[in-house]
Image (cartoon, grey):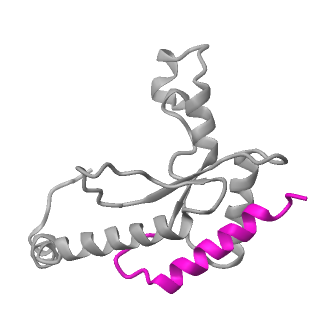
Amino acid sequence: MNARLDTMQAAILLVKLKHLDSMLEKRILAAQRYAKLLEDVEGVKAPVVTPSAKHAYAVYTIRISKSENRSGEERRESIRQSFSQNEIGFAIYYDRCIHQQPAYAAFASGRTFPACEAASAEVISLPIHPWLTYEDQATIVSVLKKALHSGEN
């Protein structure tokens, strides 16, 4: 892999660098809107950032907890399907724990890590970018809520 930066890439990134602080602030605002929209949604744990920290929100990953009738993983699958049907972008970045990665298999042979495995089965990342509007986020959260409640009866 050639990871060197050529002149054209450098020129483009120099222009983009001038906008970095503004783009980060817009991501933070989007994350704050998500936090507000999700604060009363039962079964959803949003990211927590300590007051002394500044998060870049490259991703906005939430955790879906189990309900009386379904596991967190089953509920996440409902969300995934609903997002796909409604053409809402999402990602599952952390679907396999580090001890389950081939490169680390020898270090974890025969061991389980239940908390890590549960978390990896219950997380999903919502769309987040500087141009995300409140209306977009309200729609995303509305679809998420409907998916969480589907199959609960």
Q: Residue furthest top?
A: 110
- Residue 130 higher or lower than 109, as above or below: below
Position of 129 with respect to 98 (left or right) is left
> At which x and y percent is residue 124?
57, 55
> At which x and y percent is residue 46?
50, 55
Position of 30 with respect to 26 (left or right) is right
Front-lying residue, 82 or 141: 141
Q: Which quarter of the image is occupied by the C terminus?
A: bottom right
> At which x and y percent is residue 59?
41, 60
Q: Residue furthest right?
A: 153
> Does 46 lie within the magenta span?
no
- Residue 79 higher or lower than 2, as above or below: below
> Does 138 lie within the magenta span?
yes
Number of disc labels: 0
Residue sitting at x 53%, y 34%: 97
- Tell me which segment is drawn in magenta: 127-153
Front-lying residue, 103 or 23: 23
Front-lying residue, 36 or 119: 36
Residue sitting at x 37%, y 82%: 131
> At which x and y percent is residue 58?
35, 61
Front-lying residue, 133 or 95: 133
Residue sitting at x 59%, y 75%: 140
Q: Residue furthest front?
A: 40
